[in-house]
Image (spheres, coloured by chain):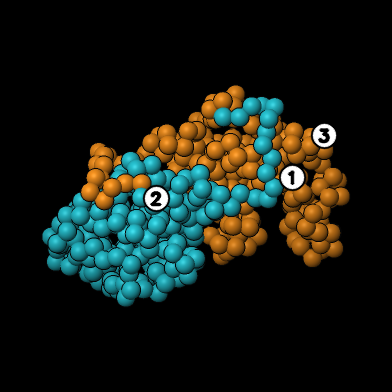
Chain colours: A orange, B cyan
Amino acid sequence: MMEEKHITWHEGSVIKQDREKIKGHKGAVLWFTGLSGSGKSTIAAELENVLHAAGAHTYRLDGDNVRHGLNSDLGFSDGDRVENIRRVGEVSRLFVDAGLITLTAFISPFQKDREMVRSLFNEGEFIEIYVKASLEACEKRDPKGLYAKARKGKIHQFTGIDSPYEPPTAPHLVLDTEKLTIEEAVQLIVSYLQKHKYLKN
Amino acid sequence: MMEEKHITWHEGSVIKQDREKIKGHKGAVLWFTGLSGSGKSTIAAELENVLHAAGAHTYRLDGDNVRHGLNSDLGFSDGDRVENIRRVGEVSRLFVDAGLITLTAFISPFQKDREMVRSLFNEGEFIEIYVKASLEACEKRDPKGLYAKARKGKIHQFTGIDSPYEPPTAPHLVLDTEKLTIEEAVQLIVSYLQKHKYLKN
């Protein structure tokens, strides 16, 4: 990669635009929000596959890699939920600054918290994607069996059951997963990213 | 980047090795530790310039982008210092998982905290770099005027003055900045990364 004797010196610090340049695309966060079971994680994972296959530099933040690590000290109280989203927002900001297309998949039920996250970003860096499905549909899918537990009172403060979900008022994209296949949903996002020049065509 | 009609589908999730492949190098964290004024940030910034110029995908975490964002809720009590380093460790783990060469520049004075961070990583992903300079030298440099403030009692619990610094017991690299120039220190790290196959030669 480099000769030991020929280090290239460069004035100033490496900044976002430098990092984007070697990646060939813009850094931005795709913030997926929606009920448990709406399809956020599935769509985000498939989208990452497609973007990666096209040579894009991506990272996906979700409960699996955040709740058990950075946010392992947080529970599900109102205060901890706010802090959970705040930290995910701040970490996303670092990833966007690193030039990556960052995908986050968290229920993030409250408009106020999502607006706080949006405020961390420059124009165009935050793309809110509402993964829409009715409570009935999500409860019927219940991929993790969480709705059944919530209905039995084994989980409290579960979004949609005994805690509210506030749909985004002005999302960049709405993906109705009762009408769209995963492939169609992913295609809509890719088209959005191309149309708005996040990706080179 | 991709045709709208020709999405490439890919089984399974994108993992670290996939991300490393399109970057052409391994993901790892270079954990700089040392007294305030030892040269951690300066060396990390210059190293990032060199790595970036060579096409490596990097990100640098330091007080500027972490203390004012993710860790803006933390102060300088013992508990908050531990939490500061824990979060930086966890965020570094995410960046390494993203395949980036991640540079962190924090005093991180306690061996126990650094060992906790090291335990988050797989073999070879964590590279501890001790930026060594005597308290006298650092205090003489005092680039931010912090030692003067600490001596006057305007800052409490300042590492080296009224809070201890525990040097690493088995760092991967020791850079004595009373003897080395910045260029020499950077060259030693680049050589280490090449020798241990983090970078393609």
Dot 1 corresponds to which residue? A39
Q: A198 or B197, which is in the foreground? A: B197
Residue shown at the point (30%, 54%) measured from the top left: B190
Query: Of label 1 and label 3, which has the lower sequence position?
Result: 1
**Split into 4 quadrants, where in the image is the N terminus of chain B?**
top right
The residue nearer to you, when weighing A181 against B76, is A181
Kindly identify which chain the residue marked by label 2 belongs to: B
- For the point 79% across and 65% down, the residue is A154
Q: Amino acid at mark 3?
A: Lys
Picture coordinates of residue A170 (x, y %)? 65, 31
Q: Which chain is mark 3 on?
A: A
- Can you tell which quarter of the image residue A47 is in? top right
Whether labels 2 and 1 share one chain? no
In this view, the mark in front (3 or 2): 2
> x and y percent of residue A91 in the render?
50, 49
Q: Mark on residue B132?
A: none
Q: Say which residue appears at 14% left-offset and 62% top-offset.
A: B179
Give the alpha-carbon distance from disc 2 to disc 1, as whole Å.
39 Å
Residue B54 left/right relative to B5: left
Residue picked out by circle 2:
B200
Residue highlighted by disc 3: A179
